[in-house]
């Protein structure tokens, strides 16, 4: 049976632990494996840290709403904020082959999200940014 849960919280790094608990509960409800639960948690944490840092320009400058929906064989996570617009096409692909000391600081957020999740979509509707991430239930579980 489809279910939806929603959490709205102030964009502060200290609230990411509360969000992690919220997302883990939804991912387990969807029937995801432990590895997939971790992937969802990591992707959502990275996305919210980027919203706080880049969209809002720091802590306490806006709220983030997280909606988790379980539909059929997948978990759908929506993150909404009213920060600065974001266009992922403007983010260069990270150079993963460069020596660590020669790599740019940061820049792995979008890369990690797309690697951890099955689908990642960014939208801007008026003043609201919406990030949609989907994780399908895998048939093989460790």
Image: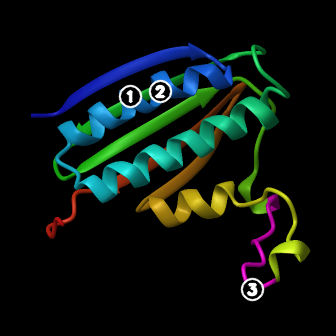
Q: Which secondary structure class fits the magenta region best?
A: loop
Examine the rendered structure and indicate whether residue 127 appears above or below residue 27: above
Measured in 3D between alpha carbons, the distance from the residue under mark 3 to the one under mark 2, in whole angstroms, is: 32 Å
Which quarter of the rendering shows the C terminus?
Answer: bottom left
Can you give x and y, in whole percent of width and height, for residue 23 in the image?
A: 38, 34
User: What colour scheme does the image use?
Assistant: rainbow
Q: Residue furthest left?
A: 1
Q: Are marks 2 and 1 in contact (CB under 8 Å)?
A: yes
Dividing the image into 4 quarters, which one contains the N terminus?
top left
Q: Residue at x 38, y 20 (%)?
A: 6
When asked about the image quadrant of residue 27, the answer is top left
Identify the residue under disc 3: 97
Where residue 12 sits: x, y (%)? Answer: 68, 20
Residue at image mark 1? 21
Horizontal side, residue 48 vs residue 50: left or right: left
What segment carries the magenta color?
Answer: 90-98
Label pair 3/2, CB-CB below 8 angstroms: no
Q: Is residue 37 found left or right of 17 in the rendered image? A: left
- Left/right of residue 79 with respect to residue 49 in the rendered view: left
Q: Quadrant of residue 16?
A: top right
Q: How far, Cα to Cα, is label 3 from label 1?
A: 34 Å
Under tag 2, what secondary structure? helix
Q: Residue at x 28, y 34 (%)?
A: 26
* Disc marking residue 19: 2
Residue 115: percent from the left, percent from the top? 51, 66
Q: CA distance from mark 2 to mark 1?
A: 5 Å
């Amino acid at each position: 049976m489809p279910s939806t849960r929603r959490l709205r919280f102030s964009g502060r790094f200290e609230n990411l632990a509360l969000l992690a608990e919220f997302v883990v509960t939804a991912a387990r409800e969807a029937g995801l494996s432990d590895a997939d639960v971790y992937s969802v948690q990591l992707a959502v944490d990275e996305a919210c840290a980027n919203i706080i840092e880049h969209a809002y320009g720091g802590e306490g400058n806006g709220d983030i709403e997280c909606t988790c929906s379980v539909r059929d064989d997948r978990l759908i996570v929506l993150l909404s904020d009213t920060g600065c617009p974001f266009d992922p096409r403007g983010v260069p692909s990270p150079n993963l082959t460069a020596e660590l000391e020669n790599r740019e600081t940061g820049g792995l957020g979008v890369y990690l999200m797309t690697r951890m999740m099955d689908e990642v979509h960014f939208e801007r509707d008026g003043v609201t940014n919406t990030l949609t991430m989907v994780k399908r239930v895998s048939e093989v579980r460790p």
